[in-house]
Amino acid sequence: MKSVCHIAITRPGLIDGAEAWRVSAHDLEALVCERLAAWLDDQTLLAKTLEPNQVGAQQTLALINAGARTAELIRNSHAAVWLQPINSLIERVELATDSVTIRTNTSLLLNTLGVLTESPGKAQPIELTCAATRVWHGRQLRLVIPGPVEASGFRHRDLELVRLMREVHQARELVRRHADKSVSAIARLEGRCRVRLDRLLNLACLAPDIVVAILEGRQPIGLSNTTLLSIRLPLDWAEQRVVLGLV
C-alpha cells in the first residue's frame, strides 16, 4: 500500500552532529491524518484560510462542506479511499524532535476540495503543526501526541498485546478444564512452561475495560508484553488502572 510518508522530511544521519532517528510510518500517518481532519472539520479556521477577496460567500460555503466531507473520509474510510485527497493536499511533511509540521497552500486546498473560484489569486502557504513526542515501546520508537489517548485520538493496536490477551484467555480456559489440579500439574500435563502459565494466570484477573482498551489500541504507548508479564497486578481493578497508566 502506498504511504503518505514518502513526502516526510527527516534529517540524514549525523547532520549538525545530531544522530538521525526513525519512527513508524503508521504513527506518522496517524498524526498527519488526524491533524488534517481536525483542520478540515473546523469551519472557522477553514474559512479564515482564504482571503475574502479570493473566495466569495458561495465558494466559502462549498469549501466548508467539502472540508467536512473530506475530514469524515479521512477518519472513517480505508486508506485506499483517503490516500488520493491526502496526497493531493499535502505539499510537505516535516518531522522535528517535538512536533510534526504539515505544509500545503491555498491552491492545493481549493483544488483538492473541488472549489472553483473566478480569481483564486496567488497560492498562499498554509502551515499546520501538532505537538508530538518520541516514546520507547519495548524496543521500538513510537511517535505519539502528548496527553491522554482520549484527548489526542491517537490509537495503536499492538498485535503482540492482542495475541497475549488471547493466550491469557486460553490459559484461563485450561485451568477451568483442570480445576482439580495445581498450576504445576497442569503445566506438566499440557507440556507448558509453568512459569509462563503462572504469569498468564496473573493476567486472567485483568479488568475487562483494560482488555477492551488493549484490543482497541487505546492502551498507554509504553505498555508492552514485557511489562504485563513482569509485574504482579493487584486484584482491585481501580488499582490496576493506576499501575498500568490507564487513568
Image (tube, rainbow, N blue to C red):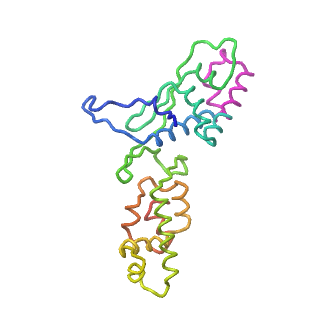
Q: Position of residue 125 (x, y in %)?
A: 52, 20
In depth, the one of 201 and 15 nearer the eye is: 201
The residue lying at 49 percent from left, 76 percent from top is 174
Q: Position of residue 241 (x, y in %)?
A: 48, 64
On the rendered structure, is 162 left or right of 140?
right
Q: Position of residue 77 (x, y in %)?
A: 63, 41
In depth, the one of 196 and 10 nearer the eye is: 196
Q: Would you place residue 167 above or below residue 102 in this image?
A: below
Q: Outermost residue, left direction?
A: 17
State the image quarter where residue 23 is shown: top left
Q: What's the magenta region?
A: 41-68
Magenta part mainly helix, strand or loop?
helix
On the rendered structure, is 103 left or right of 60?
left
State the image quarter where residue 62 is shown: top right
Q: Outermost residue, right direction?
A: 58
The residue lying at 47 percent from left, 26 percent from top is 92
The residue lying at 36 percent from left, 67 percent from top is 230
Q: Outermost residue, bottom direction?
A: 180
